[in-house]
């Protein structure tokens, strides 16, 4: 039974779900893509490639820059399917190692199916991109501290003012209670006198 499954059923299912052969071609390319060899080649040409890669990166759309610098996923979403091939073509024009082969595979199978090699190249491109450091200026920091201390002082003043107001109100209440004349008590009604008996 297992031989029948492996020889007849499984290939038929694969053929059914991959009618045009894109998935099979992408899987074959991903297996044959030699990351170590391409990585060594990129390291060897690092000085020569740096200015060219920076130029291509600066001309790239924001989506590509985001994929290169802030990538968190292991797959390329379909929404990037139009910008990734263009960027890979630009890398191939500057003879970036591996870019030509990956560009051809993306053209045949799509960027989503060849995500591994594409993201590998993007990681290598990221090594050429200078990391943006957060800009911290002393001038902007000082006003924040002043603003914070001013806000804290205002809060303290408000709370002390409210405490003083509450104390004053309590004093006024106690003064009015003690100084105000006592309200005359209502006279007690005596029981009506009984009429005399006759």
Image: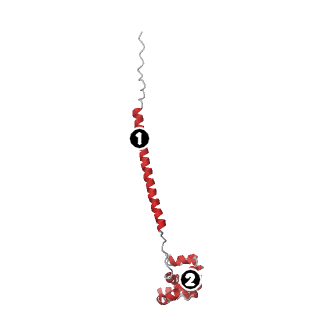
Of pointers 2 and 1, the one earlier in the residue sequence: 2
Residue 177, image quadrant: top left
Q: Residues within 10 Å of mark 2 (few under 14, many from 20)?
A: few
Residue 92, image quadrant: bottom right
Per the image, the residue denoted by label 1 is 170
Please provide percent x and percent y for residue 144.
47, 62
Count all numbered tags in the image, as a single digit. 2
Q: Is residue 20 something that shows in the picture? A: no
CB atoms at circles 2 and 1 under 8 Å apart? no
In this rendered view, identify the residue nearer to me: 157 or 166.
157
Per the image, the residue denoted by label 2 is 55
Cα distance in 3D space between marks 2 and 1: 74 Å
Q: Secondary structure at mark 2?
A: helix
Please provide percent x and percent y for residue 143.
48, 62
**Residue in view at x 53 percent, y 77 percent:** 67
Q: Is residue 162 something that shows in the picture? A: yes
């Amino acid at each position: 039974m297992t031989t029948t499954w492996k020889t007849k059923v499984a290939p038929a299912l694969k053929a059914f779900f991959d009618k045009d052969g894109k998935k099979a071609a992408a899987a074959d390319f991903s297996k044959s893509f030699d990351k170590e060899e391409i990585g060594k080649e990129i390291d060897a040409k690092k000085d020569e490639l740096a200015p060219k890669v920076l130029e291509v990166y600066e001309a790239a759309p924001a989506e590509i820059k985001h994929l290169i610098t802030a990538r968190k996923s292991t797959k390329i979403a379909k929404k990037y399917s139009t910008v990734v091939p263009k960027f890979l073509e630009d890398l191939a024009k500057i003879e970036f190692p591996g870019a030509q082969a990956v560009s051809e595979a993306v053209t045949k199978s799509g960027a989503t199916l060849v995500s591994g090699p594409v993201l590998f190249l993007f990681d290598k491109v990221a090594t050429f991109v200078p990391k943006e450091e957060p800009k911290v200026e002393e001038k902007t920091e000082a006003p924040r501290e002043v603003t914070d201390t001013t806000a804290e002082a205002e809060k303290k003043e408000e709370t002390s003012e409210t405490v003083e107001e509450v104390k004053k109100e309590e004093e006024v209440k106690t003064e009015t209670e003690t100084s105000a004349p006592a309200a005359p008590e209502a006279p007690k009604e005596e029981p009506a006198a009984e009429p005399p008996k006759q």
